[in-house]
Amino acid sequence: MTAVLAQTGASTDIAAYVKSDGRAELVQQVRGKINDLGIQYIYYQFISVTGRIVGKGVPADHWEAISEKGIQLVYGSTANLAMDRHRNYIGYGPEAAELVAIPDPETFVQLPWDKRVARVFCTCFRNREEPVDPGAYLTSDCRGNLKRIHAQFQQDHNGLHLRHGCEPEMMWLKRDPDGKPAGGVTKPNCYHIDQFEELRPVFLKVIEYSRAMGLDMIQGDHEDAPGQLELNFTFDDALRTSDRLVTYRQICAQVAREFNLIACFMSKPFMGVSASGCHHNLSLWFGGSDTVNELGAESLPGMSGAFAYRKGGENTFLPVDSEKPGPIGLNCIGGVIEHLGALTAIGSSTVNSYRRLWDTGLWAPVYADWGYQNRTCGLRVSAPGRFEYRAVDSMVNPYLMAAGLLKAFDDGIKRKLDPGEPEQRNIYEAMESGKTVKKLPMSLGEALDRLAADEVIKSAMPGEMYQVYSWYKRDEWERFLATTTNWDLETYLDCLP
């Protein structure tokens, strides 16, 4: 169900999706899980333009009906039903129809903190009664777009597909009596086991819930900001990795409620210490097959699709005759460097993201170059067979990011873009020696301008998606420019010209 589904003679995309081969059996299997697990309620969810989980809840009795008919929400839910500073609803006005979200049964899984409840991801469509393109795929559905973009990439490149992992840094903050942030739970001591130990009850609960929802948790550590942890899970197919990242955020939010803490995914809540990044470790593969990782469960608390991982196959990023990545990998690096400015508008998607780039000396990438284990570059080959995309932070919408990277890869492969020689030096020292390197955008406004001028990366936001994203983020930037901040007051309040 994670690829574009072949038309089955049905007249619309939604009809073809509902009647696709094998789906009826999956719907029946979910009914078995509902009965076996005692599920009473189901969250039908999809992802908004900012990466927020949105949707509806429905009693489990109605599973079969919802599987066929879907749930309906206003189109503007894809933009968080937000209004811009001129009081216009972003993307879609109140006169617009309602989208239809059809559940993807293979993503069904129980919520471990309340086992009466389950969740399932949905693919979104235009309403069946629309006068134009009724029942077509909704192009402002970022998760659905990734499925289709990845499927097209595989078709164009003989089955080549993206597998990636991410490194989701975030901060655990204390609450004051009014519920406001009161600093980190721990001190900003990187890799400090005692600080890690102080958060042990919290991270063990996160790991418990994560494993119960199909995340194969691997290494974790305390990072170098207050209360900052990085807990990683195994890399996989691009769609499942994106699903797992938003699930991980959902889990952290629940654990924060249980411990009366704040699970902070804001990129830069504190200056002078590291921000929260979300580096993406990328590779392109031929072949392989899905393997179910039961993660110690006697019986899976959900469908096997939520616990499946793509294993085996040929990693085309592995070196061939030298330490350099293979030809496809080099072309992909070339594609990312070519489009890094526009990609930054997706990976560093908030006004606050650029505090990370301006706070010097803390290893945030500022320049569009690549190297081996070189953290001063936007890309680094972090191990043979993969490279780390660094211009991305904890607020990223992973579906938009993966789609944008696929478009950059596609351009790099088709045009055989050469990234040049890897930079072994500290990039700042290289520039002092005369090297010319492009700089990343240093504000959200500049990044959005770079995105607007880049047709390749814009194609990762087809149809209405780019309009919705640009409108939402332009409004965010303009709201910031139209705001008096504490910095303004502290700098200018007592000044006499």
Image (cartoon, helix red, strand yellow):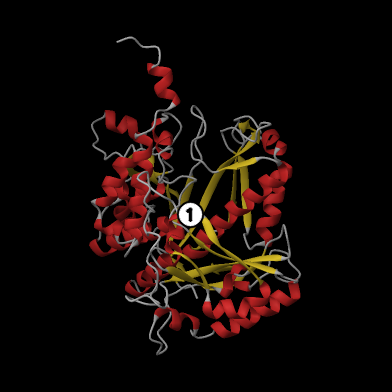
Can residue 293 be seen from the camera position used here? no
Q: How many marks?
A: 1
For this rendering, which residue is in front, 296 or 90? 90
Extreme bottom residue here? 9
Q: Tell me if 207 is positioned left or right of 224 in this view.
A: right
Give 105 or 497, whichever is nearer the viewer: 497
x and y, in percent, of residue 286 in the image: 43, 70
x, y percent for residue 471:
34, 51
On the rendered structure, is 155 left or right of 21?
left
Secondary element at tag 1: loop
Q: Quadrant of the C terminus?
A: top left
Q: Is residue 288 visible?
A: yes
**What's under tag 1, amino acid-wise?**
Gly
Q: Answer above or below: position of 75 versus 272.
A: below
Q: Residue furthest front?
A: 95
| Residue 366, position as x, y percentages in the image | 35, 37
Judge whether 128 appears above or below 233 on screen.
below
Residue drawn at x 72%, y 43% as measured from the top left: 259
Asked whether, in this view, residue 162 is left or right of residue 343, the answer is right
Give percent across and percent down for residue 221.
62, 42
> Does 199 sit above or below residue 332?
above
Which residue position is annotated with label 1?
51
Neighbourhood count class around disc 1 (C-alpha, 10 Å): few under 14, some 14–19, many 20 upward: many
